[in-house]
Amino acid sequence: MEFTAQQIADFLQGEIQGDPSVKVGDFSKIEEGKPGTLSFLSNPKYSQYIYESQASIVLVNKSFQPEKEIQATLILVDDAYQSLALLMSLVDQAKPKKTGISPLSFVSPSAKIGHNSYIAPFVYIGENVKIGDDCSLNSHCSIAEGVQIGKNVTLFPGVTIYNACVIGNNCTLHSGSVIGSDGFGFAPTEDGSFKKIPQMGNVILEENVEIGANSIVDRATLGSTIIRKGVKIDNLVQIAHNVEVGENTVIAAQTGVSGSTKLGRQCILAGQVGIAGHLQIADGTIFGAQSGVPNSVKIPNQTLQGYPAVPIMTFHKAAIVHKNLPDLQKLIYAMQKRIEELEKKMK
């Protein structure tokens, strides 16, 4: 499917500089642009590539000021990155979608499957499962009894959803993700061993949630582990039992959130953040990479980093001191030696 620059500009409400009739049928990176493709420039670090790129159309911010001639047709928009996302979503939605139930899948007679949904080979769907319209369950997904899945949900190969969990509309779960596995609940006994505490709750994913590959959301001991609407979770993330993640929060890879912690709305957790259990994290909190969070954060809209996580400017100051510790150590030893010499003279 091909689109002209004029059609794209009309859709994005952008301005054209160049040939409005040029056509594209694919996307490319600015540094690897090819004829017949559309690229974009939003990061100034890549500006050098636009002058030599072979892409036919390039999306740029309206603030972009070229330093020399550009061969490609430009479409000027308010935000090139967001405009690219809109175009890619449009193209993705235009792709034909599979429907129907493969005879190589197992679907319990008590399960209910919505219209235009696709059940691939080797999918297991247990008793009393409800799946909405326009869903896509790819091979080797396992859906346990009593699960409810909303409309337009995509499960990539190998997703596992344990019993009684709820998946909202427009959710995407990537390969290897597990929803509703047991929370890490064990009670110590007199002989030093640990007795497992049955995990009787479930997991609720509200609408427009995305879960990355090999990420885990544990079921609650009682009640629900809740991932609120619009949350985006990267690959290799662990969300423990009875956690609540607020709306539109973003969690990057290798992060772990311990049991019963409540994350506020629109938080950002960078890679390898670790959050202790039973904490309250205020709305808009940002944790830098590898932060450790042992205490609640009560003031909203802060950026924190380090262990224990502190305001970002404090972390930067401490990092400078830490870098200079070897020199400070030498200075202290020299001062100590000088003091000892002075003390000897005084005696």
Image: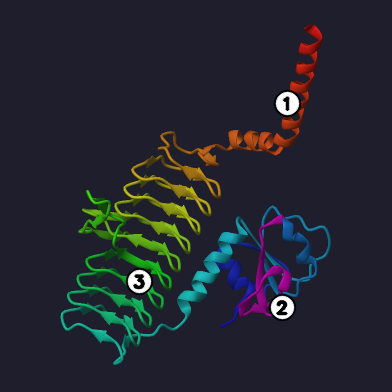
Secondary structure of the residue carrying numbered label 3: loop
Q: In the visual, does 203 lie left or right of 63? A: left
- Residue occupying image coordinates x 20% and y 59%: 200
- Answer whether labels 1 and 2 touch (C-beta < 8 Å): no
Q: In the visual, does 8 lie left or right of 135? A: right
Label 3 and label 2: CA atoms lie apart by 34 Å
Tell me which amino acid carries mark 3. Answer: Val
* Quadrant in the picture for residue 172: bottom left
Task: Return the disc, 3 or 1, that comes first in the chain's sequence.
Answer: 3
Q: Quadrant of the N terminus?
A: bottom right
Query: Which segment is the magenta one?
Result: 22-44
Query: Is 154 drawn above or below residue 282 in the view shown?
Result: below
Measured from the top left, where is residue 6 in percent x and y? 62, 71
Measured from the top left, where is residue 30 in percent x and y? 70, 68
Query: Is 79 drawn above or below residue 102 in the view shown?
Result: above
Secondary structure of the residue carrying numbered label 1: helix
Q: In the visual, does 250 lie left or right of 165? A: right
Q: Quick one: 130 or 18, which is closer to the camera?
A: 130
Q: Mark 3 points at which residue?
A: 153
Q: Is residue 310 visible?
A: yes
- Answer whether labels 3 and 1 touch (C-beta < 8 Å): no
Q: Mark 1 points at which residue?
A: 332
Q: Name the residue under label 2.
A: 34
Depth check, mark 3 against mark 1: the one in front is 1
* Quadrant in the picture for residue 321: top right
